[in-house]
Image (tube, helix red, strand yellow):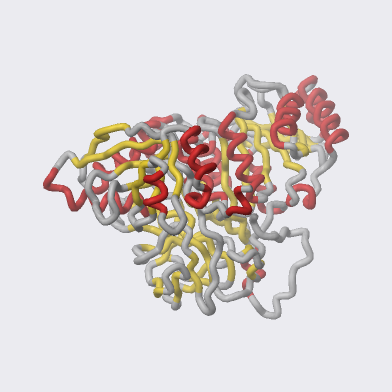
Amino acid sequence: MVPSTFTDFDSPPTTDGNDVFHEARRRRTFAIIAHPDAGKSTLTEALALHARVITEAGVTHGKQGRQASMSDWGTMERERGISISSTALRFEHGDVIFNLLDTPGHADFSEDTYRVLTAVDCAIMLVDSARGMETQTLKLFAVCKELGLPVVTVFNKWDRPGQETLQLLDEVQDATGRLPVPLNWPVGIAGDFRGLYNPESGTYTRLSRTNAGASLAQADELSPEEAALDAGDAWEAAREDCDMAVALNGNFDSEEFLAGRATPVLFAAAASNFGVAPLLDFLVDRAPAPGPRPDASGTLRALDSDFSGFVFKMQSGMNPAHHDKLAFVRVCSGTFRRGMALRNDATAKPVSSKYTHHMSGRDRDSADESWPGDVVGFSNASGLRIGDTVHAGEAVSFPRLPHFNAEHFRVVRSLDAGRSKAFARGISHLEEEGTIQVLYRGFGTSQSPIFAAVGVLQFDVALDRLKREFNAPAAIEEALPYEMARDLFGPEPEKTAKAAAVDVVYRSNGNPVGLFRNQWKLGRTMADSPELFGITEDEAT
């Protein structure tokens, strides 16, 4: 579960001269989740544009404009027009510091998205107004529910033909169980987006697209009387529908939002920069700020404790000018200062904090000081792995991040025998980053590695990165006839597994993994040998 959180309308805690609470309340750490092609990267660009971080949005011009995108910087992302890896974007708007994590929407990269969601305080669920609640959107929402994250719903692409407003609200409520509470309402049907009705003030924000959506949309605030003259029947229809929704579902309530019982709703057309400013205002005024997070024992760690954070992502190859690997650390407590003495709780070894960064896509600035909610990139910090806890002072450990169970398995081989060391190094990097899981036929050997993936697109990404970043071209040699994998436990896991006719492979750390041809075989083995899966006799019965 995510921690308790603070908002601007809470009573501030006593600081006693401590800057931690003040700085934490200035932070908003959130992720954007959606089905592929719902417009996540476009919305990310639009938020950066409204915050004056950039002067022109890069992805609003279609795939050919991805060279300018802040969030989709990878070669495959630009070529295929999809988000493959999560991206951290740090920017300021007024007195608030945003840590925005743009997640991949494709189901094949759901493990990366899950890790990102453990590092944020709330999520924006972006929904295509024409397609409504799609399969991947529902899966990602389920993760938010599991983690206890508050969720803001944004209906995007209202400048294109789509569903009716009230129908979309019903769909969200039926699919999520959360009460959709409108914060604004589109004037004009889907495909004829003229502006937004604000039910709290009763005013109308008329929108005018500029520079094909690459620049800020012109927004004119009109009174109800002026709106009636300007938009006519569309204005009256918007008011009636919105007032009906408010009468049924109520107005925004922070307690209901933070408790996960309600989801505030906004309407937008991110490609035209319509409706983005109200979302930014909501994040500033009403989104949760970082609060105490539970450690591995379930105890909430106070914000003003010694510095602590956990690694939720590893990434190399972000910038050709920096041939390094970054460990993305979510700051959970205390103050981070570059150069301070830190340890990795998993190994009890020191962690270098000399080279640390704040990221904005592939760009980076030196992170001299950071606070709860911030994301810090540790460059070439030896020994760090995904899920590790980094801390100052007394030891603390945050919950480990789980492996997703792989469903696709391929033997991979190098295409250049002279590049065997580069091939092995690349495989190691990809495994450490969580780009793909790597298994071996025998522990202690690096021959004939097996790529294990949640989705088949991960294979393409791994092969592409081996070639581009490590000059180690490789090919898939063989598809293995398995449908699932499970880590094995018990006093003699290999012996027990082989007795049950289960194929055993190994992770690079020596932990055994069982490969199963189908669900029936897995179920039969679990029933006969529950100890293999860490299931006790009491749990088995």
94, above or below 381, in the image: above
Q: Residue farthest to the right?
A: 247
Asked whether residue 275 is in view, the answer is yes
Place residue 357 in its image quadrant.
bottom left
430, above or below 161, in the image: below
Place residue 197 in its image quadrant.
top right
Q: Nearer the viewer, residue 285 or 51?
A: 285
- The image position of residue 323, as x and y in percent, is 28, 56
- Tell me the residue at 66%/26% (across/down): 193
- Tell me the residue at 50%/41% (across/down): 110
- Side (left or right) of 473 relative to 333: left
Asked whether residue 455 is in view, the answer is no
- The image position of residue 148, as x and y in percent, is 67, 50
166, above or below 152, in the image: above
135, above or below 439, in the image: above
- The image position of residue 195, as x and y in percent, is 69, 31
Q: Name the quadrant of the N terminus.
A: bottom right
- Side (left or right) of 1 relative to 81: right
Q: Residue farthest to the left?
A: 418
- Side (left or right) of 532 relative to 494: right
Place residue 173 in its image quadrant.
top right
- Tell me the residue at 70%/75% (across/down): 15
Q: Nearer the viewer, residue 171 or 323?
A: 171
- Tell me the residue at 70%/60% (across/down): 4
Q: Nearer the viewer, residue 117 or 511?
A: 511
